[in-house]
Image (cartoon, rainbow, N blue to C red):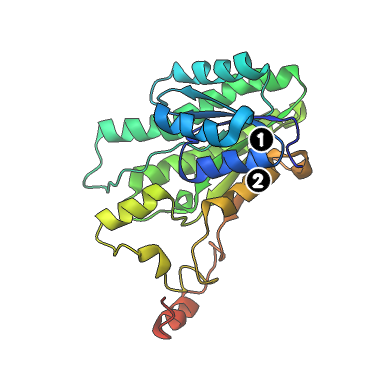
Amino acid sequence: MLLKDKIILITGSTTGIGAAIARRCVSQGAKVMLHGRNEDRMKKMCDELGHAAKYVIASLDDFASCNKIVKAAIDTYGTIHGLVNNAAIYPRNTIDTADVELFDNIMNVNVKAPLFLSQEVTKIFRKQNGGSIVNIGSINAYCGQPDLLCYSMSKGALMTMTRNLADSLGSEKIRVNQLNVGWTPTENEVALKKQEGLPHDWETRIPLMYAPIGRLQTPDNVAAHVTFWLSDESIPTSGAVYEVEQYPVIGRNRLNDLKMSNDGDTK
């Protein structure tokens, strides 16, 4: 098992990709500290995962929560071997609709919290001669869709943080890597797209130009990559920004996309 006897802290781990990561970590031999804001969801996840899971409730827009979350893991398990900065928010905004309050909220959750959670676990990793941080980014970090302006900025900042920390902490055997995740239909994403006017079964009718294998990737697909980057199997790589997508993000030939679209390759 990739994570036998490892203690993994995962933010935003009650639904979607975070919940899938928690399940995968446990299946690979780890014990996990779950994090979220909804206690009912937390208890449900712990019931599912059994003795291998405990939880802490905290809001990541509060700076003091970073210490609280890490302390809860230490108090419960005695140490931490891996941190997954997964939690993020992505309210829609453009250059015309963005405001200071919204920007600050997105940056607090998506950038500030991962930074200071990383600061807290680094203290632990130094005592035990190493550890692994995996940041869950987005392909929107490179540009982003027009109505995800501040979210895309936050993921770009997270990507720079990943590379900077990997460079500065590498000699201490602390690895920091990032997965820039492509379109993944989590529960929240499915509901959001329905609110935006897509049909109830939109996720089963994706054109091949967006999903060459015939479907979008699942949270479980992403979780499999996360466990590898948390594990010793990925040593010594650090500072990697790895695109979890089913087509090349950079340099893709859009003429091929047009051909697939014109061929009617839509389920």
Q: Determine the residue positioned at 65% across, 46% down.
A: 240
Mark 2, Cα crowd under 10 Å, few <14 / some 14-19 / many 20+, is some
Q: CA distance from mark 2 to mark 1?
A: 9 Å
Q: Amino acid at mark 2?
A: Ala
Q: Is residue 129 left or right of residue 195?
A: right
For label 2, the SS is loop
Residue 221 position by quadrant: bottom right
Above/below status of 134 relative to 54: below
What residue is shown with label 1? 166
* Residue 239 shows up from this direction: no
* Residue 144 shows up from this direction: yes
Find the residue positioned furthest to the left. 96
Residue 207 position by quadrant: bottom left
**Nearer to me, 158 or 224:** 224
**Which mark is first along the chain, 1 or 2?**
1
x and y, in percent, of residue 44 in the image: 47, 34
x and y, in percent, of residue 32 in the image: 61, 30
Q: Determine the residue positioned at 52% across, 20% down.
A: 69
x and y, in percent, of residue 199 in the image: 29, 65
Q: Which mark is residue 246?
A: none
Mark 1, Cα crowd under 10 Å, few <14 / some 14-19 / many 20+, is many
Find out whether the residues at labels 2 and 1 contact each other: C-beta distance under 8 Å: yes
Q: Amino acid at mark 1?
A: Ala
Q: Is residue 104 left or right of residue 134?
A: left
Above/below status of 40 relative to 238: above
Q: Determine the residue positioned at 66% across, 35% down.
A: 166
What residue is shown with label 2? 240
